[in-house]
Amino acid sequence: NAGVTQTPKFRILKIGQSMTLQCTQDMNHNYMYWYRQDPGMGLKLIYYSVGAGITDKGEVPNGYNVSRSTTEDFPLRLELAAPSQTSVYFCASTRGVLAGGYQETQYFGPGTRLLVL
Amino acid sequence: AQSVTQPDIHITVSEGASLELRCNYSYGATPYLFWYVQSPGQGLQLLLKYFSGDTLVQGIKGFEAEFKRSQSSFNLRKPSVHWSDAAEYFCAVGGGATNKLIFGTGTLLAVQP
């Protein structure tokens, strides 16, 4: 299994451009997440999804959009890129929450480095 | 508010020395606690996790962590550090129906020969 894959690995955008960061998982996980990682700040949750057709905002959703039309894919869209969106973006997935509240492990992709100039 | 604090931004240890990375959390419900490691340019890999039961949990690569509810802590330890352990370490707390994680700001570990 490939696990969680992300494309592209690296991208440079000009201010105002748009792009989609791709995330795919082959583990049949219901839950998927997008995080951004900034130096010294840890990871912040942007959006998450608990199943196809269901998405919700995380801690830092402004400037981003998501969709979840299939179980496997969870793309992140930047409509008008801004320098503040320069970051490393990680996608993660998990089976979710099992019986008794058991929290499954989140598995992370390798990340996409985005530079907005 | 839910939060995770990793008070040490950088730590340098000598190869073969013991290691302890600190993590304190604030969480309203039963916490589910995780330690992840990130090598340069890589994604995050799970080292270990605590859900319930024995408060001392064993993970991969010889790491262990101890959950102390009274101190709201989940410190990571390793008795003898190897040069390949140089990386950034993140503590995280999760829970609830959506399995969202809250991460600490990370501790960067350097290993001296």
Image (tube, helix red, strand yellow):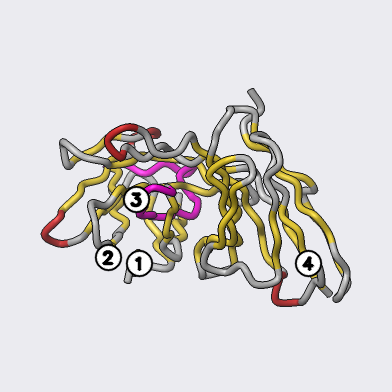
> Does mark 2 fall on the same chain as mark 4?
no
Q: Is residue B13 above or below residue A63?
A: above
* Element type at mark 1: strand
Of all chains, the one bearing label 4 is A
Residue type marked 1: Ser
Residue occupying the point 69% across, 55% down: A66
- Mark 3 surroundings: few (<14), some (14-19) or many (≥20) residues within 10 A: many
Name the residue carrying label 3.
B95
Which mark is nearer the camera, 4 or 2? 2
Name the residue carrying label 1.
B3
Is the residue under label 2 in contact with that under label 4 (CB below 8 Å)? no
Magenta segment boundaries in residue numbering: B79-98
Q: Where is residue B74 in the image (x, y as percent from the top left)?
A: 25, 53
Of B113 and B80, nearer the camera is B80
Residue B26: numbered disc? 2
- Mark 4 surroundings: few (<14), some (14-19) or many (≥20) residues within 10 A: some
* Element type at mark 3: strand
Q: Distance between the residues labelled 4 and 2?
A: 33 Å
Residue A115: numbered disc? 4
Residue occupying the point 39% across, 62% down: B11
Residue occupying the point 61% across, 67% down: A61
